[in-house]
Amino acid sequence: MTVTEILQFVDNLVFTKTDKHLDDLQKKIIEELFQGKTYKQIANIYDYDEGYIGDESRNLFKILSEVLGEDVNKSNFCWTLERGTNCSKIVSFGNNNINCYSNYEKSNYQENNNTEKAKCFYHDLTLSPKITRFYGRKTELECLSNWILNQNTHLISVLGLSGIGKTTLVKRFVDLNLQQFEVIIWRSLKFPKSLNLLIDDLLNVCKQEAKETIDDKLNQLFNILRNKKCLIILDDLENIFINRQFAGQYKPEHQDYKTFLQMITEIEHQGCLIIISQEKCQEMISLDSELYPIHSLELSGLDNPATEILKNQGLKNEETWLELINLYESHPKYLQYISILIKEVFQAEVSEFIKENSLILTEDFKSLFDSIWMRLSDIEKEILLKISQNNQPISRDEIKQSLSLSSIDIINGLQSLTRRFLLTKLETDEKLFNLSAIFREYLRIYHH
């Protein structure tokens, strides 16, 4: 028996269950497990996070357990598959030949897979990101699992600053729960299309020919949502909102998305739509979560796993890492940017960087913040520039006294900035608004 035979056997099993072949990482994991490697050793060999390798392995074991009708885990993985590849009995399923173990197991396998065969799985993740490392977010993953798998939540928004890890979190949930859904479709609105074309696209993935009118197309889609367990992800939703206006206002050509999101919450079905955005849309604010099955998940900085980012970047002086993490607010993208600088200029010595005793923003930071700045209204910019002049949190009254804006403009501006996650309220005093030290530094350098 060779590793090639094992890989072919496992690939057949996985394809039978998921309609997808093993990816490169899964093949590497299988090869190394058969060499007796631990998760940590595999992670080190291929430069992955140990927890990520463990999660990928357990997801693979789960698929194999469901196909084979017996528990497959790390301790019995090798001999279970060796036994399977040495067996001569064959059961045909689709276009694949699957090795089985006994007549009893063969009967169970056929019965289970007749049920699976009755289901048509439509998974299109071609536009989703490939995750090589995943840090923490255990609580957030549990929230998504509970809302989607237990509560049948129809609409979920995952929100937060650019680079905070929204897309990565949702993709990790999808990777861990592929078998829970008959339909999974991931689409990005980075270059947004009309709702009409989006619905055509969704129907096409489900092998349905779209009808003529948008009403008929929506009926087709909701019939699918009623009859199949569906998960649809729309990333970069902020791109259907108007630039230089207050947060969450739809462009004229995308107003029908608002209607679509309302329908998702109001019509009975068993699907879930996840929207990923840098700013809140009106539906997640105005709808009553007591009456409608909706939830919002707002992401902030990482906790302890932030040290793993620095470790994987090869930084030195571990005793100073916490100071660096706090300085850059545990934000994964910020830490990635500054780690690159420390490696290139400070020879990976964090202690030498800390001696600079100042926030340093690279061109990567400027590019990221410029894209945010361009989206803001003039009123929001004026408020932010005023707040950036203070190193301490500031109240609405202080802003009002120092700016020649109307009270309603200031109120709407503050609300919009909080919906973009650029301002936060102090937990100890909700009358005070706080601005990120890093974004404040950006404003001082480039907009004063």
Image (cartoon, rainbow, N blue to C red):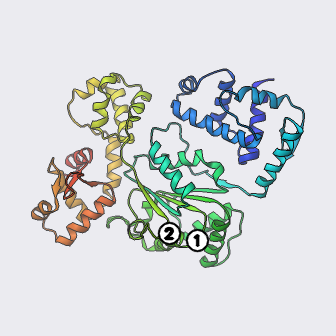
| Residue that label 1 marks | 268
| Residue that label 2 marks | 261
Q: Is residue 9 above or below residue 197?
A: above
Separation (CA) of disc 1 from disc 2: 13 Å
Q: Amino acid at mark 1?
A: Glu
Q: Residue at x 72, y 63 (%)?
A: 207
Query: SS of the residue at dot 2?
Result: helix
Which quadrant holds residue 384? bottom left
Along the line of sight, the residue nearer the viewer: 88 or 2:
88
| Residue 71 can be seen in this image | yes
Q: Position of residue 201 (x, y in %)?
A: 62, 64
Along the line of sight, the residue nearer the viewer: 435 or 58:
58
Along the line of sight, the residue nearer the viewer: 383 or 425:
425
- On the rendered image, what quadrant is the N terminus found in? top right
Q: Residue at x 68, y 26 (%)?
A: 31
Left or right of residue 84, residue 52 in this image: left
Q: Residue at x 52, y 33 (%)?
A: 51
| Residue 187 can be seen in this image | no
